[in-house]
Image: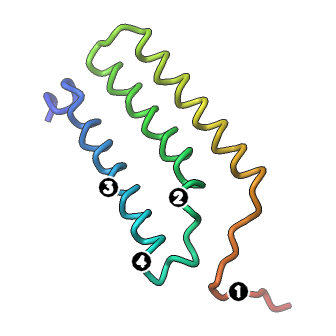
Amino acid sequence: MAELFASGRVIDLILALVVVETIALALAGRMTALAGRLPPLRRLLPNLAAGACLLVAVRAALVGADWVWVAASLLAALMAHIADLLTRLTEPPVKSSGQHSTVSQ
């Protein structure tokens, strides 16, 4: 188990899961009953990219890469995070087709 972490392979596995998650969300948004309730993929990609960049930074640190690679990955994560925030602030909210609960008084 220690080798899995020391080699950075654990991060590779997690990044593969992020790719699978992205594909699943894209397919679910187009082909299932969730299509009306999921945000479009273009709204999810900046968030997924920020997380992936953070994972790359962790991997670089785990394997002892030069600090420049860690810093570059963190900068990319910051840029993706800013893109995510701008997307959330400038686009109208996604309309939900589900029922909303109400609080009775």
What is the C-alpha distance between the residues marked 1 and 3?
32 Å
Labels 4 and 2 touching (C-beta < 8 A) = no
Query: Which secondary structure lies at badge 2?
Result: helix
Query: Which secondary structure lies at badge 4?
Result: helix
Q: How far across and down, in percent of the image, does residue 58 sit? A: 38, 27
Q: Earlier in the sequence, mark 2 or mark 1?
A: 2
Q: How far across and down, in percent of the image, does residue 19 sit? A: 34, 49
Residue at 76% across, 87% down: 102
Kindly identify which residue carries mark 2.
41
Query: Which secondary structure lies at badge 3?
Result: helix
Which is more foreground, mark 4 or mark 3? Answer: 4
Q: Earlier in the sequence, mark 4 or mark 1?
A: 4
Amino acid carrying label 2: it is Leu
What is the C-alpha distance between the residues marked 4 and 3?
16 Å
Quarter of the image for the N terminus: give it.
Answer: top left
Amino acid carrying label 4: it is Met
What is the total number of numbered labels drawn onto the structure image?
4
Q: Which residue, as the protein is rendered here, is positioned at the far front?
A: 30
Labels 2 and 1 touching (C-beta < 8 A) = no
Relative vertical location of residue 23 with respect to residue 27 in this rendering, above or below = above
Structural crowding at the residue carrying mark 4, measured as other residues with C-alpha within 10 Å and reported as few (<14), some (14–19) or many (≥20): few
Kindly identify which residue carries mark 1.
101
Residue at 26% across, 18% down: 63
What is the C-alpha distance between the residues marked 2 and 1?
26 Å
Labels 4 and 1 touching (C-beta < 8 A) = no
What is the C-alpha distance between the residues marked 3 and 2?
13 Å
Relative vertical location of residue 54 with respect to residue 47 in this rendering, above or below = above
Kindly identify which residue carries mark 4.
31
